[in-house]
Image: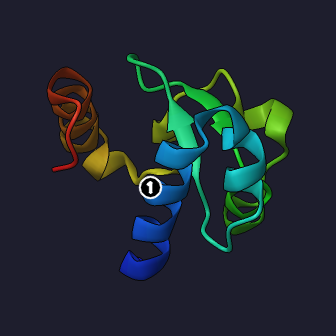
Amino acid sequence: MIDLKETQRLKEQLEANPSDFVAIIENTPLAICITNELGNYSAVNQNYLRLYGYEESEMVGSSFLMVVPENDQDRLQDLHDIFMKLKDEI
């Protein structure tokens, strides 16, 4: 379930203090990942690691598809690519 209030609070906090993004992301109860344009993890917070049961070293640099069921991977990669192109949430 997505906590829309927490998501909005985070967006506002990041806009107000972009240089504090690491601390902001680590101090939220949400599980958060950041991917690059290829869909590889650039960063994950501790809640994301707990959710999927991986170590940071296993995830950073790997494709986000590692946590996606095989049948959904093509569709979700396409959605990721659209998101990266448009820079807007779908």
Residue 50: image quadrant is: bottom right
Rate crowding at label 1 as few (under 14), some (14 to 19) or many (20 or more) other CA atoms within 10 Å: some
In the image, 38: left or right of 29? left
Front residue of this view, candidates 5 and 18: 18
Residue 29: image quadrant is: bottom right
Disc 1 target residue:
11
Q: Residue at x 37, y 77 (%)?
A: 4
- Residue 46 locus on image (x, y percent): 79, 57
Front residue of this view, candidates 11 and 34: 11
Which coloring applies here?
rainbow
Q: Residue at x 71, y 40 (%)?
A: 20
Q: In the rendered image, is residue 64 in sight?
A: yes
Depicted 13 relative to depicted 73: above or below:
below
Q: In the rendered image, is residue 1 in sight?
A: no
Q: What amino acid type is highlighted by mark number 1?
A: Lys
Depicted 27 relative to depicted 18: above or below:
below
In the image, 6: left or right of 85? right
- Residue 63 locus on image (x, y percent): 52, 28
User: Which image quarter is the N terminus in?
Assistant: bottom left
